[in-house]
Amino acid sequence: MIFLNNFIPNGDGNQCMGWAWYLANDMQFFLISPLIIYVYHKVSRSLGWGIITTLIYVSMLCGFFVSRHYGLAVAGSDAPGANAFFDEYNKPYTRCGTYLIGLLCGMILYSKHYYDKTGKVYDPLALWFANIVDKFYIRWIFYCIGAVLINVFIFIEYTAWDGIPDHGHDDWSNEARWFWKGCSR
């Protein structure tokens, strides 16, 4: 397995193990993350933060523009000739945002652990985030915000599935679809 099966056009040739599409994504993320960690650790902490946040925004924009280009629907059938799984869902450039957020969390946890062990500040921004989240009431505020956002993002899709029996596709505007596809990964 060469871990490029998510780039083979229309999935031709990668149906032997249909579940392996995410292994390719994981390997591609794994191959890029040491470069980002190297820049963060050896070159500049702020440059590492900048690269990761830029890549998160680029991932969101890729989801937006891929959805726009192929006419992908949030629910129901896509535009003729489009396939949401092969055109958008299994591509690393639309899915890397969550992996990069995990990388940011790792940077924050490492900085906090380093400070607790040595008393030296490794990354001031990461330590600041860690100290904020370390407060009990702030953590509960984040938990509540997270619970609300999860419910909003789960139940807002219900409105997309609502029009399917009538039209065969969602009733959302194109702009709403593109925004959803850009932000939902």
Image (cartoon, rainbow, N blue to C red):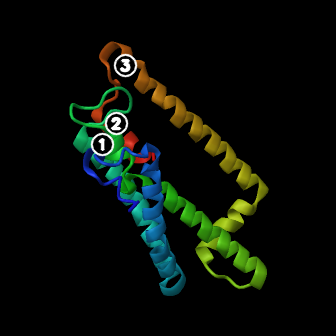
Q: Earlier in the sequence, mark 2 or mark 3?
A: 3
Q: Nearer the viewer, residue 104 or 34?
A: 34
Q: Position of residue 97 (x, y in %)?
A: 46, 56
What's the residue type where badge 1 is placed?
Ser
Mark 1 or mark 2: which is in front? 1
Going from N to C along the chain, the mark reached first, 1 or 2, is 1
Query: What's the distance in space between the residues labelled 2 and 3, CA to CA?
Result: 15 Å
Which quadrant, please, contains the N terminus? Answer: bottom left
Residue corresponding to mark 3: 164
Q: Earlier in the sequence, mark 3 or mark 1?
A: 1
Q: Residue 161's x, y, as percent? A: 42, 23
User: What whole-number distance in Å separates the C-alpha atoms at marks 1 and 2?
Assistant: 8 Å
The reply to whether discs 1 and 2 touch (Cβ–Cβ < 8 Å) is yes
Q: Which residue is mark 1?
A: 67
Residue at 40% in and 60% down: 3
- Whether residue 139 sits left or right of residue 86 in the image: it is right
- 150 vs 11, left or right, is right
Above or below, 41 relative to 140: below
Q: Let me know if residue 14 appears in the view.
A: yes
Q: Residues within 10 Å of mark 1 (few under 14, many from 20)?
A: many
Above or below residue 127? Residue 82 is above
Report the residue at 40% width, 63% height from top: 55
Q: Residue at x 21, y 31 (%)?
A: 80
Horizontal side of residue 41 vs 85, given as left or right: right
At numbered mark 2, what does the secondary structure look like: helix, strand or loop?
helix
Q: Which residue is tagged 2? A: 177
The outermost residue toward the top is 166
Classed neighbour count for the residue bearing mark 2: other residues with Cα under 10 Å, few (<14), some (14–19), many (≥20): many
Q: Quadrant location of residue 102? A: bottom right
Amino acid type at mark 3: Ile
Verify CB contact (< 8 Å) between mark 2 and mark 3. no
Residue 103 position within the rendered picture, expressed as x and y whole percent measured from the top left? 55, 65
